[in-house]
């Protein structure tokens, strides 16, 4: 009994010491932010969701490389934080950043709806929020997203899901048995890709979806799921895939199949395309994070004039004919992948208009951008109002939900229309 | 009167029936009531039953896929099952898998010979297990919390160390061994790996001294201590073996996917526990067999393949998966109860 009391008191002592240390620490870190006056650098945060895969790593590195370019590093104090996959953790992390005096938060959001309130609170306290890849519904947030994006050379052809679905239908001549390799179940991004793809597939009765599975935007899981589906359907003729297509290809190769595949931007996929594999590489560019950081810093420096709230990043579009290896570390002469990098390295680290200063080195290390280029005329990259419903869950004022029949291919998708 | 019913030997002494001996039908009944046997029966039945979901089943391709994809679960479930046998859980399994894959890829890419990289990565994973074991055995912290903490620390260290290269390509030799493209005597190489691993793991769990001690510790730590079983060193060895098995799974997954990022282990934690429990092991420790775990792992794999073939939507798939696991558990429980009643 006595020893237990002793142990308890020791424990209490340890907890007390830990608590006081924490208070002292937080007092130290809070001090500069509180003064906030001249001579202090403005606080900028980069907030990630999950990490540990190439896409997230490259995206974060590109954003950090922009923020830590010499011209920005002298003005801003940048902190990177990883929130993991738990939305409550991300909310509390954002709250801490707001409380510590953040001026700008660039973030990969876990949920469009759950973050709405904390973002609104931050905006009320003067914080600028820029989200990349996925979106947040809060009105004050800037969204930099490819989800509804259109082809650069044909802006009427929009949506990754729909465009790759159409490409697969074309490659198959309008008929065939296919697999669908979806993303992370329950995410808004997966839903938009899937819904717009189905809108295309449903128009082609010759297309038979024999298996649909979730590869969770992960190459290894996509490979295992494809291998399972192949056991039952060795006669499959094409695969529509979200991120994870490198794994899809590996499963097909193990089964000795070389059939049309549409997917995202992995190095392995583009390598195979360049060697003649039939397919299309499109989808989410990690460059979005660098663009989001540029947009955020531009707003801090020059105000928000001319910056649309809804920025749509054009869809990359590389085919069997256009896939070409890069000899150096830049996208030059139309090259579009890096043979020396890992299979799951995501090749879209540049954006010709919005992020021309990016380098392979910046994507891998988070440093090495010496001069940040000015943003182009951003209104050119504003999302079309009729696609707003997909990223804000609501239409703009003067617009109502309806079926979009004009200015967009494929026609007939749900969206916003002017009454 | 007793002479009429009980046999006598030559000296006229009555031979009493050995209470351990039962009639043949009873013994057969008891055999089929064992959870291990039930799991294997369900597993074997699953193949012809697969016909319901696909006209292409049952097929050799289905069997091959089950064994190739089942390899990883058979490996991770061995380590997890060993820890469960002592009454604990290894929640650091996903990060240890990632360590095995990352270290092998990283070292091989910096010029280490493949075998050297594999050995070094395995030792690294064994160290994680050793730390888990030391904390559980000597500090007496609950295994659940210890492994959660070490896993979290390991995951963060990996993230920090790997900055810029979270994905490591696999050495070519490893890829050709585990991708399923190569065959030996007409059987894909991952299936050979499955057979060899299962044999060794079975011998360790069911036939070795450490295996027997693990059962003893799982049944009662105090009784084991009294009986002279070295409880602490047994726990330490068990967690170290679990670390090694997770590491090997990571190395195999690296080869299978010819590359791996740090999330490679994320999807294996729950299946590793499920396979062990479906295989008839007691979740609180002390009872179970590795043959059952292998059956459980292969059953979960073939189930995944069948559900994929059925073309259900994801929601229905998850429900079916849950329901079938529950059925397997109930069958095992019923078997165990009736089996116990007979003895």
Image (tube, coloured by chain):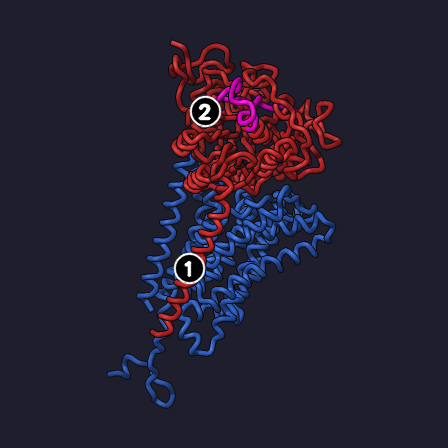
Quadrant (top left, top right, bottom left, bottom right) of the N terminus of chain A: bottom left
Task: Pick out the residue farthest to the bottom.
Answer: B11
User: Could you say whether the residue bearing mark 2 is in a helix, strand or loop?
Assistant: helix
**CA separation in Å, label 1 and label 2:** 45 Å
Q: Chain of mark 2?
A: A
Which residue lies under the disc numbered 1? A15
Q: Give the chain coloured red.
A: A
Work out whether residue A264 or residue A205 is closer to the camera in this orientation and state it: A264
Q: Earlier in the sequence, mark 1 or mark 2?
A: 1
Which residue lies under the disc numbered 2? A391
Asked if residue A298 lies in the magenta stretch, the reply is yes
**Residue B239 position in % (x across, y down):** 52, 62
- Residue drawn at x 43%, y 36% as measured from the top left: B314
Residue A169 against residue B39 in the figure, above or below: above
Specify the quadrant of the image occupied by residue A112: top left
Asked if residue A67 lies in the magenta stretch, the reply is no
- Check the rendered structure and report the hue given to chain B: blue
Residue A297 against residue B60 in the figure, above or below: above
């Amino acid at each position: 009994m006595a020893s237990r009391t002793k142990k308890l008191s020791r424990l209490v002592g340890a907890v007390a010491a830990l608590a006081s240390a924490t208070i002292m620490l937080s007092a130290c870190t809070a001090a500069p932010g509180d003064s906030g006056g001249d001579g202090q650098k403005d606080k900028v945060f980069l907030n990630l969701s999950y990490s540990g895969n190439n896409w997230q790593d490259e995206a974060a590195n590109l954003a950090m490389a922009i923020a830590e370019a010499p011209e920005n590093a002298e003005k801003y104090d940048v902190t990177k934080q990883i929130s993991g996959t738990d939305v409550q953790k991300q909310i509390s992390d954002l709250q801490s950043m707001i409380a510590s005096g953040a001026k700008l938060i660039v973030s990969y959001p876990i949920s469009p709806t759950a973050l709405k309130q904390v973002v609104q609170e931050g905006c009320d306290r003067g914080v600028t929020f820029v989200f990349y890849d996925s979106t947040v519904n809060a009105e004050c947030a800037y969204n930099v997203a490819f989800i509804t994006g259109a082809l650069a050379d044909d802006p009427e052809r929009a949506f990754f899901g729909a465009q790759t679905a159409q490409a697969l239908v074309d490659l198959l001549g309008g008929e065939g048995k296919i697999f669908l390799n979806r993303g992370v179940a329950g995410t808004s991004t997966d839903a938009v890709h899937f819904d717009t793809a189905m809108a295309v597939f449903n128009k082609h009765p010759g297309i038979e979806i024999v298996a649909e599975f979730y590869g969770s935007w992960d190459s290894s899981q996509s490979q295992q799921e494809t291998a399972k589906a192949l056991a039952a359907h060795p006669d499959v003729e094409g695969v529509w895939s979200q991120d994870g297509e490198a794994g899809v290809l590996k499963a097909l190769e193990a089964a000795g199949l070389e059939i049309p595949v549409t997917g995202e931007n992995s190095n392995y996929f583009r390598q195979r395309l360049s060697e003649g594999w039939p397919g299309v590489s499109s989808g989410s560019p990690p460059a979005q994070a660098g663009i989001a950081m540029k947009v955020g810093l531009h707003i801090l420096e020059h105000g928000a004039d001319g910056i649309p709230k809804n920025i749509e990043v054009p869809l990359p579009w590389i085919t069997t004919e256009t896939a070409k290896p890069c000899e150096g570390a830049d996208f030059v002469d139309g090259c579009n992948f890096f043979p020396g990098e890992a299979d799951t390295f995501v090749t879209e680290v540049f954006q010709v208009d919005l992020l021309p200063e990016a380098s392979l080195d910046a994507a891998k290390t988070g440093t090495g951008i010496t001069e940040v280029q000015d943003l182009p005329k951003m209104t050119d990259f504003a999302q079309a109002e009729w696609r707003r419903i997909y990223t804000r869950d609501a239409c703009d004022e003067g617009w109502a939900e309806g079926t979009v029949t004009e200015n967009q291919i494929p026609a007939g998708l749900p969206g916003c229309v002017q009454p | 009167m007793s002479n009429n019913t009980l046999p006598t030997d030559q000296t006229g002494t009555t031979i009493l029936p050995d209470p351990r001996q039962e009639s043949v039908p009873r013994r057969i009944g008891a055999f089929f009531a064992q959870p291990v046997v039930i799991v294997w029966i369900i597993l074997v039945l699953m193949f012809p039953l697969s016909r319901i979901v696909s006209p292409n089943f049952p097929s050799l391709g289905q069997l091959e896929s089950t064994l190739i994809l089942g390899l990883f679960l058979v490996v991770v479930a061995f380590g997890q099952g060993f820890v469960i046998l002592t009454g604990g859980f290894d929640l650091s399994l996903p990060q240890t898998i990632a360590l095995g894959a990352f270290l092998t890829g990283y070292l091989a890419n910096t010029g280490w010979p493949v075998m050297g990289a594999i050995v070094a990565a395995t030792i690294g994973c064994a160290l994680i297990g050793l730390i888990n074991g030391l904390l559980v055995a000597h500090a007496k912290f609950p295994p659940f919390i210890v492994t959660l903490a070490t896993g979290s620390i390991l995951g963060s260290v990996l993230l920090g160390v790997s900055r810029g290269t979270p994905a490591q390509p696999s050495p070519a030799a490893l890829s050709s061994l585990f991708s399923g493209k190569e065959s030996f005597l007409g059987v894909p190489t991952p299936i050979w790996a499955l057979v060899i691993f299962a044999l060794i793991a079975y011998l360790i769990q069911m036939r070795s001294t450490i295996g027997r001690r693990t059962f003893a510790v799982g049944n009662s730590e105090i009784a084991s201590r009294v009986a002279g079983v070295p409880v602490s060193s047994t726990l330490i060895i068990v967690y170290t073996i679990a670390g090694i098995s997770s590491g090997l799974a990571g190395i195999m997954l690296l080869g299978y996917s010819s590359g791996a990022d740090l999330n490679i282990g994320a999807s294996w934690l729950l299946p590793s526990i499920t396979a062990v429990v479906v295989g008839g092991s007691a979740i609180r420790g002390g009872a179970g067999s590795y043959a059952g775990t292998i059956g459980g792992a292969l059953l979960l794999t073939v189930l995944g393949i069948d559900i994929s073939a059925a073309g259900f939507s994801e929601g229905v798939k998850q429900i079916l998966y849950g329901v079938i696991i529950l059925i397997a558990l109930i069958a095992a429980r019923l078997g165990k109860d009736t089996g116990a009643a007979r003895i």
